[in-house]
Image (cartoon, helix red, strand yellow):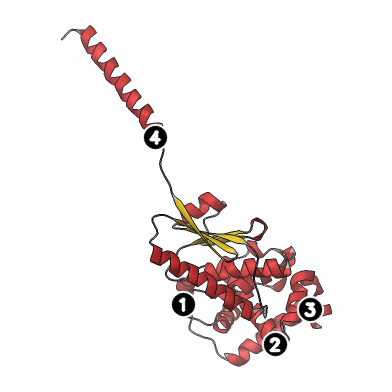
Amino acid sequence: MKLGKIVTIILIGFIVSCSNKSKKNEEWTKITRESKTIDNITYHFSSKIHISRRNSAIEECQNSITENLKLIKETEFTNEMDIEFLESRTEMLKYTGMGAQGMAFPDRNTFFTLLKDKDSPIKHEMMHMITMYKWGTPPETSTWMNEGLATYSGGICSKYSLTEIYKYFIQSKKLITMNKLANNFYGNPEMIAYSQSAFICKFLIDNYGLDKFKQIWVKGFNEMISVYGFDHQQLEIILAKYVNEKHPTNIEFDWEEFNEGC
C-alpha cells in the first residue's frame, strides 16, 4: 500500500474516533430523585432505593424527632425542612463540601444524611436541626454543646459508655481542656472532642437541669460562672471527681478500635 493511502486511512480513523468521543461526551446521564412529604418534612431519595428502605429511613427520622424532643423537654417540632438521603461519602462531599456522614443546615431548612443500617447519623443530625430551630444557633464558644448534645443523643459507635470513655481520657492524658473545647472545638482530635463533649453535656443536664444548659447555649461559655456558680476549671475538677468515683482504677480500653470511629 502506498504511503499516501496509509496516511489517508489513519486520518479517517482519527476523525471517526474523535467524532465518536465527541458524541459520547455529549451524552447525558439520567439521575432521578424522588420525594415524599409527610407533615412538615419532605424526604428525598434516589430512585434506586427500594420503597421499603425509604420507609424505614422515614420511620427512623420520625422516631428521632420524638426521642430528641423528649431528651430536651420540648413538645413539638413543626418547622418545614428537607432531608436528603445519600448513598456514599463521595455524594456527601459533592453536595455539602464535606465527606461526613451527615450535615445539618438549619439556615437552609435542609440536612443531608447517609443511608446506613448501622450507626446511622440521622438522630445526631436531627438533634442539630431541632435545637438550632428551638434555641437558635449557639455562639462559637458553645459549639462543643451543639456537637456534644447531638452526639449524646445519637450515640457513639463504641462498646464503652461515655463515663468509661472519659475515664480513659483522664488516665491516658488525652483529655481536652474546657478552654480548648470552647475556643477551637474543630481544631481538636475528632473522636475525643465529640465524645468528651457528649459526656459533659449529659452530666450538666442530668445534674443541673436543662434551663441552665440552655442559658450557656445562648450566652456562651464565658457565662458559665454566672449560670452555674462555678467556672470551667472547677467544672473539670467536678467531672474528674465524679468519674474517678465511678471508676477508681484504670480501665481496659482499646484506643485503636475506638479511634477508628464509625
Callouts 3 and 4 close, C-beta under 8 Å = no
Name the residue type under label 1: Asp
Q: Give the labeled residue for mark 4.
A: 27
First in sequence, mark 3 or 4: give its number.
4
Where residue 69 sits: x, y (%)? Answer: 63, 77
Provide the secondary structure element on which disc 4 rests.
loop
Query: Distance from label 1 to label 2 (Cα)?
Result: 29 Å
Q: Which residue is mark 3?
A: 231
Cα distance in 3D space between marks 1 and 4? 51 Å
- Please give the residue where the numbered disc 1 appears in the rendered image: 254
Q: Secondary structure at mark 2?
A: helix
Residue 241, quarter of picture: bottom right
Q: Are marks 3 and 2 in contact (CB under 8 Å)?
A: no
Q: CA distance from mark 3 to mark 2?
A: 16 Å
- The picture places residue 87, in percent across and down from the top left corner, at 44, 58
Label 2: how many Cα within 10 Å (few below 14, some 14–19, many 20+): few
Q: How far apart are labels 4 and 2 at the CA level? A: 62 Å
